[in-house]
Image (tube, coloured by chain):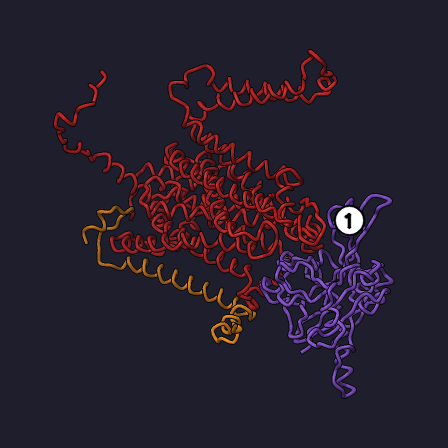
Chain colours: A orange, B red, C purple
Amino acid sequence: MNFPLDNPIYRFLYWFVNTPGVGGAGVLLLVAACLGSFAAALRWIARGAQADEPASYAYPTSALHDHQ
Amino acid sequence: MLQIDPQDKTHLIDSLFRTGPRFWVAALALAAIVGWGAAMYARQMLLGLAVTGMNRPNYWGIYIVNFIFLIGVSMAGTVITAALYLTGVNWRRPIARIAEATTVFGLMIAGLQVIVDMGRPERMLSMFIYGRAQSPLLWDVASLTLYLLTSSFALYISLMPDLGILRDNLPEAAPRWRRLLYTVLALGWRGNREQWRRLERVIRVVSILIIPIGVSLHTVTSWILSTTLQPGWHSTILGPYFVVGAIFSGIALLFILVTIVRQVSSVKFYIEPRHYRNLGWLFITMSIIWFYFTYTEHLTMIAGQDTVEFPLLASKLWGQDAPSFWGMVLLMALAAYLLISPLLLPVRWERALFFRPRFALATAASAGLALVMAYAPQTQAVVAGPGLPDLPAALRVTAIALLLAAAISILAWLRRHVVGGAVIASVAVVVGMWLERWNIIIPTVTHPRLIAWAAYTPTLTEWSLTAASAALFGLMLLVFFKLFPAVSLWEVAEGRVIDAAQAAIEIPLPPESGQPKWQRRGIRKRLA
Amino acid sequence: MPRWAMVIDLDKCVACQGCSIACRQENNTPVVSPEQAALGRAIRWNDVFPLPLNEPAGAGAYPNVKPRYMTRPCMHCANPACIKVCPVQATYVDEEGLVRVNYNRCIGCRFCTIACPYGVRYFNWEQPTWTPEMAQHLNPDTVSEEGSLEGPAVRPKGVVEKCTFCIHRLRKARARAKLEGRPFRADEYVPACVETCTARARYFGDLSDPDSTVSQLAASGRAFRLQEEAGTHPNVIYLREG
């Protein structure tokens, strides 16, 4: 039977789960990706106000999306 | 300038700017409890965790119970609203904002519990600087952070159109800082077609993503326990069990909070008994699923009778942990009974005298009296002999019979008062679910493998911090619902239009298909 | 690399608790008040406790009394349950098979104490204190490598601690061998409990050396390990009584 750590994939996984700091970096990366995508989404929504449409609505209905 | 229905303006906007004495009294009371909790925590930081009731082997106690409980109740809010949004259910609209706010603040308080439990909280950042990916605690940190950020984002984007409405419809007397707050937070919301298109797109994507994130949070929390070797925890069922328990307790807390908001503000106009009835069906379903999981978990323990697990089960069923275990089961059964049985009562029976609430109260009081008499010293002195009745036993049986009668007689009242019944059931479930989290942690830590069994009693510090956490949660919601409307203005306005349009639609009968005479054989004439 | 292991002969052990006391003196274990001890907060890296754990009546009724005692240091498992769950690697297993705790890194989450199936880990619930006499005779040895703090070093409150197989003695023995310019031999170092045992019931050595005492005793017919079904591969081997 081959010892799993002879395999480079398992060696990488062992390093990944065991090394202190790698896990923490992963969490911070996840948080950064989250915040980045949220900021981008908010900016995209805010930019929508600049479209050349005179009418504004307090609430939507499905009719708002049907006539594109 | 975004225009809204003047009724919505009176109910939802004007109330935000009238802070009466009730608000200040509530805020001050909650702040006082939070302050007391902070003082106890400062004392704990100074003296160490010796001020708690934890010891060897009870290394985890009430703080972790609170942590899992709070994560559980938080999970339901955003997941429920997201699931209901995606399935196109309209009655979610008035309760969506309360649910989302519950999730966000509940998660923050849950994170606080872990920090309170740490022996060296100043080394908190070590979790990130030295974080090891193999540890289930780190998975939990990642999942909690992800869910907190995503649900905060979900709350914010569904709040944006309301912020625009608030900015444009402030009363004259509104203070400048509030005007500034809404203007800044609205991010220039205009509400044109393109913006609505974009907003709804983002809401849909977030709703789809938040369901797996929410489910993953509670599964990962369960993996903290199930990846250890400890009896009662090393089980595959813990993951789904936690998720089910979370949704169950979350809906219960939602019922309670929605009722409180409804009672103290004018959102009564928007949240009707039919919302309670509809959410009640989901509640009943989760109750049944919860009973199923609990039974399965304990069945495997009973059947296996593993030497390290069986003492745990024995303790839960008739030992040290029996009060909390049976208390939990009774509360859950009570909640299920309160929700399901009123629906089974035939409507015709409601008129009978037996089903008047006064009768139920009188019967219950008599049952209590009989119980008191059964255990009174005078009754014990009566010796049971031939021909003489066994008085204490007879009184106990009478008490139980009267209690059952009261339970049936209250059904009519429960059926009429959907809100009241739902709230009583919810309180039972919230307490029951907290006990369930207790029953997951404490029996296992008190019955370890190679240490003598011990008992765990929480101290004043731990109870104070529990109360302070609840108070902080309440305070955050109180302030949030003073600054922002508790009911989503744009969603209920949209819902009103949709309901009106659907009411105007007349759905015709399907086309008739005739049947040849030979097929009609055997069909009796319609009874007049 | 040596693989440190301990063999404890339960037939010779008289439960004098000399090992337990020697360990506490050697490793600067804090003392707790009687109230705290009654609460179960006493720290005993090597614990001597009666068996069976939960039924004292099982020891028999007079005159047919058969008390049994177990002495238990940290197992220093080859596949420890505790190191896997530490979120900050405050506890880890080194190349010699010792499971170590770094007091400077520990955040006090107590996950490792919960995960250990043998209950060998202890937590500092309060600031460590000693009686005035003991405070004057603390062991000055510490193990401090690259910012870590291990061994008998005085710990702060809120961190986890446990038996280290007296790693400070290992460091000192290695340093002495290096100073004298000769290779280090595995029998140059024994933990305090092994040195003190009045019945000579404890043996310590290198399990990877087939000629060492521990290797020979581990192959004995009386040898067993605690909770082998847990899959932790402990390095403390017991020799059955009788």
How many numbered badges does the structure rendering display? 1
Image quadrant assignment for residue B394: top right
Kind of residue sitting beneath label 1? Ala
Residue drawn where x is 44% and y is 40% of the image? B286
Q: In which quadrant of the rendered image does the C terminus of chain B lie? A: top left
Q: Residue furthest bottom?
A: C181
- Residue at position x 30%, y 41% in the image: B493
Q: Residue furthest front?
A: C221
Answer yes or no: is residue B120 visible: no
Q: Is residue C198 left or right of residue C44?
A: right
Q: Which residue is mark 1?
A: C38
Query: Is C174 left, or right, of B323 in this rendering?
Result: right
Answer above or below: position of A50 versus B399. below
Q: Position of residue B210 (x, y in %)?
A: 40, 53
Q: Residue B92: x percent and y percent?
A: 36, 41
Residue furthest to the top in view is B387
Can see residue B517?
Answer: yes
**Residue at left offset 48%, top offset 76%:** A8
User: Quarter of the image holding residue C123?
Assistant: bottom right
Q: Is residue B165 above or below residue C3?
A: above
Mark 1 Cα shell of 10 Å, populated few (<14), some (14-19), many (≥20)? few
Say what secondary structure mark 1 lies in: helix
Residue B65 located left or right of residue C44:
left
Q: Position of residue B150 (x, y in %)?
A: 42, 56
Residue C81 in the image: state x and y as whole percent: 61, 62
Chain on which label 1 sits: C
